Image (spheres, rainbow, N blue to C red):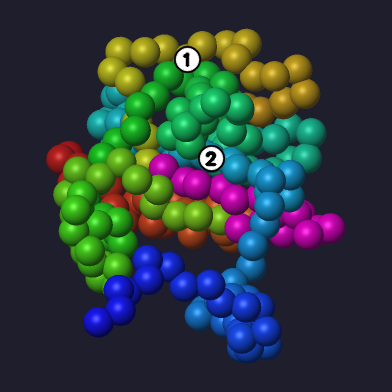
Amino acid sequence: MDPVPLCQHIAISDIDLHTYTSSAMAAPRYPTTQYLAGNFVISAGCVLFRKDPATHALEICVLHHTKRNEWLLPKGRKDRGETIEQAALRETFEETGFKCELWPQKMPTRAPEPGVNNLFTTQVVDGLAEPIGVTIRDLGKSDIKVIFWYVAKVKDGVEKVYGTQMESESYESIFVDAKVAAEKLTFENDRDIIRQAVALVTPNVKS
């Protein structure tokens, strides 16, 4: 019996180049939009909670942009080398003046446990400090901004720090009752983020 060759040389002419090329350049299985570096901006922000010092009612911090007369949530662009979570907390502190921390919640997630494949399963898991929402904003000219939103709370015992905003920023930060905070905001997308945060946080908060 002749030995089996370790490798076999195939001439290019033996390959159906049309079939090979079509297979190698197949379209994605799902509708897909792809953005390369330089065409997207990563931003992050928080819905910042605290309990009113006097009444212990749950409150949310909102920003008044004094130049545009808009009511907003704190957020901003991720710096180089930052994680998205670090950016969310830094931007929230800079724009509100309150040092804060992520506040883990019981929430739905598509993220699997380590080593577990549940690609098509949504589970409700306790103690997660993951994004509660993602906003995709079209900036035009094939550019987008991706905003990751988190739940955060003011650190215990801290007071507001003044002078934390950048020179170009003009925000007043105030705390309002969580039940009506969404209606205070200018944009409906921001209101949806607050409603999601309140729905997650309220069942776990003791009066």
Local SS, label 2:
strand
Please state if 161 lies on the left or on the right of 113 as rendered: right
Residue lying at 47% horizontally and 15% vertically, measured from the top left: 160
How far apart are the two marked residues, 1 and 2, measured between alpha carbons?
Answer: 21 Å
Residue occupied by mark 2:
44
To which quarter of the image does residue 28 belong?
bottom right
Local SS, label 1:
loop
Q: Is residue 16 magenta?
A: no
- x and y percentages locating residue 178 in the rendered image: 38, 45
Locate the N terminus and report the quarter of the image it occupies: bottom left
Residue lying at 37% horizontally and 71% vertically, measured from the top left: 5
Of 10 and 50, nearer the camera is 10
- x and y percentages locating residue 128 in the rendered image: 25, 45
Please state if 144 lies on the left or on the right of 76 as rendered: right
Q: Residue furthest front?
A: 1
- x and y percentages locating residue 180 in the rendered image: 44, 50
Vertical relation: 178 (above or below) 26: above
Residue occupied by mark 1:
160
Q: Earlier in the sequence, mark 1 or mark 2?
A: 2
To which quarter of the image does residue 205 belong?
top left
Locate the C terminus and report the quarter of the image it occupies: top left
To which quarter of the image does residue 19 belong?
bottom right
* Region in magenta: 136-150
Can residue 21 be seen here? The reply is no
Judged by depth in the image, the label closer to the viewer, 1 or 2, is 2
Callout 1 touching callout 2 (CB < 8 Å): no
Please state if 51 lies on the left or on the right of 191 as rendered: left
Count the labels in the image: 2
